[in-house]
Amino acid sequence: MRKILAYILTSIHLLFFGLGIVIFDLPQRIAMAIGGQRAQQKTVQLLNFFLTWSLLLLGSIPRWRQATDLPTDRPLIMVSNHQSLYDIPIFFWKMRKHYVKFISKIELSKGVPSVSYNLRKGGNALIDRKDPRQALPEIKRFAEFIEEHNYAAVIFPEGTRSRDGVPKFFSPNGLKTMLKYAPSALVVPVSINNSWKLVRFGKFPMDIGVQPTWDIHPPIDPKGRPFEEVFEQVQAIIKEGIVLK
């Protein structure tokens, strides 16, 4: 019975999810043409509100647990583990007053309604993971952009999703470059749990009744500290917040 219900609810969820990214593509473009990037970002926030809460159709309630308020007068670098594509929409919605941006693989810049347009036009970084000569200057440009506007950036140092919730190797390179070119940024560790369980059986059917959580830990000021020390602290906090069960 549970599996039958999973097929039914997954079909409804994916219908709503797909409609969301298709429907919001044109409003993004219109908003950009009329009001510029800030207006375009408002439509992106609404889209991701829709995508986040579409999880209710699976009997899942996403929980954002934030330990403290985050300042808007300094850039933020949110460093998180990565478990599924569902990790992302809630950042856009919950961090909307910080105009959150992402580092993404360049392949996603084409072919996905709403998502590809926002990645190209919304101030995000697009990197070719096979070409460090392209990736490093792009992250530098991105960090300077975040620094200039006091925006928030999300980076996933694992580089790819964990399919079972167990953290993969955390690469320090992205954060190191970001801190070099966004020197006033605070680092915010984030621990994501149970997002991987949504797709533990694959994309169809998805699991139902999963309760994914995003734990936003207190920010760390890296100023005047060795990078290695900061990175080890951030990595330890994230991993301590991951529940493996």
Image: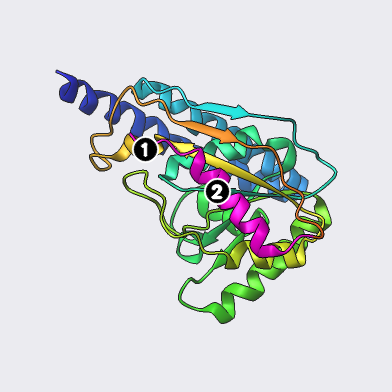
Residue type, mark 2 in image: Ala
Front-lying residue, 7 or 60: 60
Residue 47 visible in the shown view: no
**Magenta part of the chain:** 225-245
Provide the residue designation for mark 2.
Answer: 236
Tell whether label 1 touches label 2 (CB within 8 Å).
no
The spot of residue 171 in percent (x, y) is: 52, 64
Provide the residue designation for mark 1.
Answer: 244
Q: Is residue 113 left or right of residue 96?
A: left
In the rendered view, would you say 114 is above or below 228?
above
Q: Secondary structure at mark 1?
A: loop
The spot of residue 154 in percent (x, y) is: 61, 50
Query: Residue placed at 76% from the left, 60% from the top?
Result: 225
Q: Is residue 25 left or right of residue 60?
A: right
Question: Which corner quadrant holds the N terminus?
Answer: top left
Residue 28 visible in the shown view: yes
Question: Which corner quadrant holds the C terminus?
Answer: top left
Query: Residue placed at 64% from the left, 70% from the top?
Result: 138
The spot of residue 230 in percent (x, y) is: 67, 56
Front-lying residue, 5 or 214: 214
Mark 1 nearby-residue class (10 Å; few <14, some 14–19, many ≥20): few
